Amino acid sequence: MGIGDIADGVARGVEQLGASVSAALFEPVLRLGVTGLSRSGKTVFITSLVANLMDRGRMPGLVAASTGTIRAAWLQPQPDDTVPRFDYESHLAALTGPAPHWPQGTRAVSELRLSFLIQPGGMLGALRGPRKLHLDIVDYPGEWLLDLALLDQSFAAWSEATLARLAARPLGPEYLAALAAAETGAAFTEPAAQALAAAFTAHLLASRAAGWSDCTPGRFLLPGELAGSPVLTFAPMPRPADAPRGCLWREMARRFAAYKAHVVRPFFRDHFARIDRQVVLLDALGAIHAGPQAVEDMRRAMAEILTAFRPGRSGRLARLIGIKRIDRILFAATKADHLHHSQHPQLTAIMQAMLREARDRASFAGARTEALAIAALRTTTEETLSHNGAPLEAVRGTLADGRQAAFYPGALPDDPGQLLTPARQGATKWLGADYAMMDFRPAAQRLKPGDGPPHIRLDRAAEFLLGDKLARPR
Ligand SMILES: Nc1nc2c(ncn2[C@@H]2O[C@H](COP(=O)(O)OP(=O)(O)OP(=O)(O)O)[C@@H](O)[C@H]2O)c(=O)[nH]1
Ligand SMILES: [Mg+2]
């Protein structure tokens, strides 16, 4: 064998290897971003969406499912070797198993890849043969989302904003007392930093438990393996008149910068930079139930987050990590199964009004948007009750203790301004109206073969988010 043969053999080997690697590399991938505050319903949404994409019996609104274009859908190893896999099987078992319950709050990032084999009908489809599409979805704790707002804030600006709202919130006065006793201009000591960070963290945890959305830094609530490290051992404080090198204030400012550089930025860079499509989940009903302050708090938090996603140079993410243009955004009001369907249009309108300013400011130029009231997991059936002789459109579901209950959450106004205006004006209670919410647990059920878990409009959500990629021959 001459040298030419070896070279030829090597070249051919490389070619073959290249063919199989590049085939996988060039299979199209759609990255779906699921954005929502803590408890907005991200984990349940991802679990039910994936289950209903694998068993498509309840997805008539997804055209590629009803026409049979999707030949198969299966879970694959995800592309990122160092990110834990989304625990789909456990979450689905929790929701649909023999003793159904909700999955726990998410404590870390995880990722899942769902792959489709697609064969469009007609001559063209038959000629081109089947092709693949991969759908990559990331789940994360909603608490971390608000850290986006920190990225372009200085320690001084963050401290000022945080200290201004602290006094009126749980354990805020206690933190302010601890801060008053500390010497922020004196030489830094670790015990002093730890004492302040502990008091501040206690305040954040209590505020979150009381229903406030804007509790940053997010990792203080869910530290994971960073617990106790310097990046999580700081707290807000005003700049002392004299701030010599090595003083407590300077070290706190340094740690705040390190938190942004080493924790916040990598998280958004790794998981948000390459998103193609986005679904924004909003638990508007939960906020309405919690009262006007919670509605206003949620509205402002979402405005902060969505502005960061603004494409172009003015968007925070775009500037920092070069986010690509997202071409479709779905705004979804979750947990709509708490309402009879006759009230779904009002819920959608309220969510749209809550996000109005954010959408205007973010001006997702070129992106198609849609708004839907959905339930990723439907836990209720509809029922008409009689109240003082008049019909009352209610729902019925199972309570945590297993009892069945009919439930009427109150009449949402046709005009969202009736809720949003008092919320903006700082009202503390709804005038002349009462909104209730119930902790229904997932209903026990036997799924027919081929059926995913019951839902409301998840098929329409899927059609908007990925229908075109599934249906169109390439
Ligand atoms: N009735 C009803 N409740 C829901 C639905 N989706 C979510 N919930 C409720 O909302 C809670 C939070 O849902 P999750 O999916 O865990 O929320 P999350 O956004 O992942 O929250 P974090 O992990 O804390 O960020 C659940 O425990 C349920 O009580 C739904 O479709 N219907
Ligand atoms: Mg979650």
Image (spheres, rainbow, N blue to C red):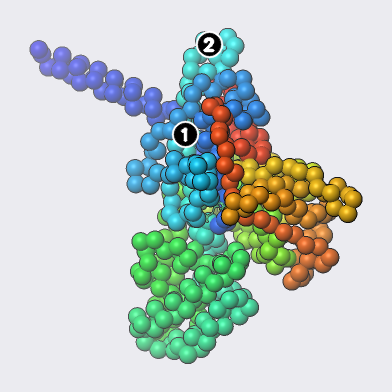
Residue holding disc 2 = 126
Q: Which is more toward the observer, 299 or 448?
A: 448
Secondary structure beneath label 1: strand
| The furthest residue to the front | 403
Query: Is residue 330 at all visible to an observer of this figure?
Result: no
* Label 2 beta carbon within 8 A of ligand 1: no
Name the outermost residue toward the left: 1
- Whether residue 239 sits left or right of residue 398 in the image: it is left
For image coordinates 52% across by 10% down, the residue present is 127
Q: Residue at x 70, y 42 (%)?
A: 381
N-term mark: 2 or 1 = 1
Q: Residue 348's x, y, as percent?
A: 74, 47
Where is residue 218? Give x, y as percent: 49, 63
Question: Is the Cβ of the residue at disc 2 closer than 8 Å to that at disc 1?
Answer: no
Classify the position of the C terminus by image quarter.
Answer: top right
**Residue bearing the label numbered 1:** 114
Q: Measured from the top left, where is residue 340 in percent x and y?
A: 75, 45
Give the residue type that dot 2 points to.
Ala
Q: Which label lies toward us, 2 or 1?
A: 1
Which quadrant holds the N terminus?
top left
